[in-house]
Amino acid sequence: MAKEIPDLLAEVRTGTGKGAARQARREGNVPGIVYGGGREPLAINLNYNELLKRLKAGRFLSTLFNLKVPGQEDVRVICRGVQRDVVMDKPTHVDLMRLRRTSRVSLYIHVEFINHGLSPGLKRGGTVTIVRPEVELEVTAGDIPDHITVDLAGKDIGDVIHIGDVELPEGARPTIARNFVIANISAPSGLRSAEEEAAG
């Protein structure tokens, strides 16, 4: 199932250059440019408050957006840079890159854990310690997975789940080359302290 792509609303910016950009900022907008995808660059304005909200939510530079501009067809974009005011740290310009459905892009994908009831370790009172609730994957823009699934069936206390243990959607691959840890099954705290005493 493909992840629902959030809309990013913008308007065509009339005029180019510093004067038009300053005018846009005075009107409560952040100027931007959309480029790539085999088409001419498009000067746009984004609403300042909406953009700030998305920036504060995090992952703005690794989120795929559906750009909606009146009079233009919707296009998938990813942010390639946000310029900020050096004193106020406010966004002053945004660079967006158009993506074809076949483009490869790195995005953070949610990790879902299933079959808790089939884990011997959890039945014995252990807990799932999640190291990475999201994993950065390189995926195709036209086929973004909603999540990746970690199966806890058969997992016992002390078991460690690596990215290599997870079946990834076709065409997706981790951006990190090493076999990193996603989660592990920890012993319950009472059992841990008893084991530590015995070891001591």
Image (spheres, helix red, strand yellow):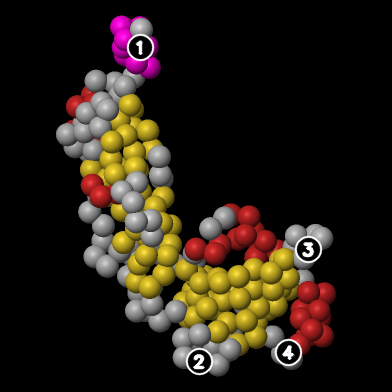
| Element assignment for label 3 | loop
Judging by the rendered image, the residue that carries numbered circle 2 is: 39
| Mark nearer the N terminus (1 vs 4) | 4
Q: Amino acid at mark 2?
A: Arg
Residue 190 included in the magenta stretch of the image: yes
> In terms of image quadrants, where is residue 91?
bottom right
Q: Amino acid at mark 3?
A: Val
Residue at 27% in and 67% down: 171
Number of the label disc, if any, that sits on residue 86: 3
Q: Position of residue 72 (x, y in %)?
A: 54, 88
- Answer above or below: position of 122 versus 115: above
Q: Position of residue 45 (x, y in %)?
A: 68, 78
- Answer above or below: position of 51 versus 149: below
The answer to whether any part of residue 190 appears in the image is no
| Element assignment for label 1 | helix
| Mark nearer the N terminus (3 vs 1) | 3
In 3D space, how far apart are the residues under numbered discs 1 and 4 (Cα atoms)?
A: 68 Å
Q: Amino acid at mark 4?
A: Thr
Judging by the rendered image, the residue that carries numbered circle 4 is: 16
Residue at 44% in and 79% down: 99
| Element assignment for label 4 | loop
Number of the label disc, if any, that sits on residue 196: 1
Q: Amino acid at mark 1?
A: Glu
| Mark nearer the N terminus (4 vs 2) | 4
> In terms of image quadrants, where is residue 109?
bottom left
Magenta range is 189-199
Q: Residues within 10 Å of mark 2 (few under 14, many from 20)?
A: few
Task: Name the mark nearer the viewer: 1 or 4.
Answer: 1
